Image: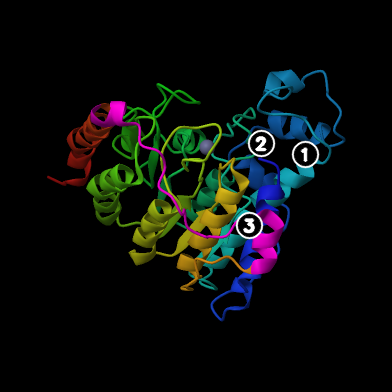
Amino acid sequence: MKPVRLKQTYELLQAYEAFDHKNVSLEPPFPASIEDLLTFHSPEYINAVENLNNGNETNNAFNFNFGPGDNPIYKNIFDASLLSTGGSLVAAKLIETGTVDRAFNISGGLHHAMPGYAYGFCVFNDPVIAIKHFLKQGLKVAYVDIDCHHGDGVQHAFYDTDAVLTISIHESGQFLFPGTGWVEELGTGKGRGYSVNLPLHPYTSAEIIMWAFNQTVLQLIDKFNPDILVTQLGIDSHFNDPITHLNQTAQGFESIIKEFDKLPYPWLAVGGGGYDTIAVARCWAIAFAVMSKQKLSNKIPTQYSGKYSVDSLYDPQPPPTHSNYQSTIQSYAENSVLGIQKMVFPTFGIR
Ligand SMILES: [Zn+2]
């Protein structure tokens, strides 16, 4: 989760001269304000993170889930978190004011952060805070999270409202952190039917992920008819990822991004997980290119390929297949899709 993966993404796009394209402008982030953070986080938690900014442990850090493990304390943790959150807010404001119709904050997507504690490498929940900004303008938001992990913090924020449709496609909580994201997590009260979860079995292929996506996500978004599309583009679903087990490919990831690209809504994309840093750089460069209508050659420009020993933008080889699991993988996906069709589709009048 170290920012080197952002640097590698930036450098790759720079090597392709992608920032020089007529459709692109680079906007600096500003730090999110305390007021922005308060739209989701508790004052006690914000205060606790601020007190960690010098990098030294405080007496109460553990109460907020900081310490050894997923949420280490580091110098400037508060300042850095304000900037990555602010990046998503800059993007949201550019979209909301109609200045741009799409924006991508690769440093965002910290979907696990909870109101009162850090969780799963995430300090402040920028997708929630950006979506709250849209809601304040009276806009309806569809949030689609394709990170390998369940988008639990975002689901939690909007569990009881019908103003935000949250959809998370992820490796099943049976096998992976955070252990949630079941089809049965539908939302409550007015929000019932507006939280959608599509759990998948380890080693699910790009083809099956795409099939499951096509069976559910597009129809739901179409019926919900949002004002804004927000996507969390975590690429820890990639088969090279060291901490997860889905078998997504760069090509499969691009196919999903191309489906988002066809939708008629203003589009805010944020980053997310991804722990094979070169797979992150390649896939987010691909997403950036689709969003800005550019075509990048498969051959990576030499200044980058020489530095990072990577030649092709797309995966040259498919991932190894786990043939013993094929029927389990297939029926797991079918079950999840069927569950959504049975439990969620009626809310939207889809038959
Ligand atoms: Zn993740």
Q: Residue 328 at what x, y percent from top left?
A: 26, 26
The residue positioned farthest toward the bottom in the image shown = 22
Does residue 349 sit above or below 171 in this rendering?
below
Which quarter of the picture shows residue 274?
Answer: top right
**Front one among 185 and 138:** 185
Residue count near mark 1 (Cα–Cα under 10 Å), binned few <14, some 14–19, many ≥20? some
Q: Is residue 206 visible?
A: yes
CB-based contact (under 8 Å), mark 2 and mark 1: yes
Q: Amino acid at mark 2?
A: Val
Does residue 318 sit above or below 13 in this rendering?
above
Nearer-N-terminus badge (2/3): 3
Write the start and end of the magenta stretch as one range: 302-327
Numbered disc 3: secondary structure:
helix
Determine the CA span between mark 1 and mark 3: 22 Å
Question: Where does label 3 land, which residue?
Answer: 9
Q: Amino acid at mark 3?
A: Thr
Q: Residue 31 at what x, y percent from top left?
A: 73, 53
Q: Is residue 140 visible?
A: no
Numbered disc 1: secondary structure:
helix
Q: Residue at position x 47%, y 43% from top?
A: 238
Nearer-N-terminus badge (2/1): 1
Residue count near mark 2 (Cα–Cα under 10 Å), binned few <14, some 14–19, many ≥20? many
> Comparing marks 1 and 3, which lies closer to the viewer?
3
Question: Where does label 2 land, which residue?
Answer: 123
Nearer-N-terminus badge (1/3): 3
